[in-house]
Amino acid sequence: MMFAGVVVGNNPGEVWVDNNLNPSSALVWSSGLGAFHFMGSARNNCFNQSIEMLIENEIIPLLRSKDRNDFEFSICL
C-alpha cells in the first residue's frame, strides 16, 4: 500500500515510468519505507534494458543525496 500511495501522490517518494502517458512498468521509491518496488509488466523489454542506466543515472544519485549506502528492491508476484 505504501508504494501505491506514492504512485497516486498520497505518500512521499519518487516514481520512474517507461511512458508518462501510458505506463506499463514503473520503479517506485517510498521515502517512508526507504525501499524500491518494481510495478507493472515483467516482460517490458524496453524498461528492463534501461534499468542499468536508470540505476546509474537516477537511483545512485538519489541515494547519495539521502546519505544512503545501500538499498532494497522488492517485487510481488
Image (tube, rainbow, N blue to C red):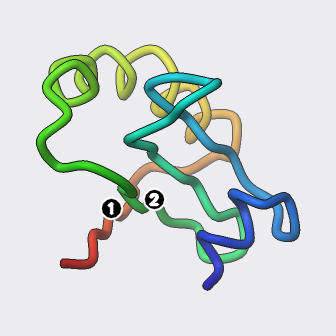
Give the residue at the far bottom of this rendering: 1
Residue in the foreground of this view, choosing between 19 and 32: 19
Q: Is residue 52 above or below residue 71?
A: above
Look at mark 1 in the image and give the residue it sits on: 73
The residue sitting at 35% across, 64% down in the picture is 72
Is 67 displayed left or right of 19 in the figure?
right
Q: Is residue 27 left or right of residue 45?
A: right
What is the spatial separation of the Cα atoms under label 2 and label 1, in whole angstroms? Answer: 5 Å
Q: Position of residue 5 (x, y in %)?
A: 73, 72
Q: Does 1 sit above or below residue 52?
A: below
- Tell me the crowding category of disc 2: few under 14, some 14 to 19, or many 20 or more residues within 10 angstroms, Cα based: many
Which is nearer the N-term, disc 2 or disc 1?
2
User: Is the residue under label 1 in contact with that under label 2 (CB below 8 Å)?
Assistant: yes
Measuring 68% from the left and 45% from the top, which residue is drawn there?
14
Outermost residue toward the right?
10
**Tag 1: residue type?**
Phe
Quarter of the figure with the C terminus: bottom left
Q: Position of residue 20 (x, y in %)?
A: 62, 24
Q: Residue at x 39, y 22 (%)?
A: 54
Q: Looking at the picture, which amino acid does disc 2 mark?
A: Phe
Quarter in which the N terminus is drawn: bottom right
Q: Quadrant of residue 51?
A: top left
Residue 40 image offset from top left, x and y in percent:
35, 53
Q: Residue at x 45, y 14 (%)?
A: 57
Q: Which mark is residue 36?
A: 2
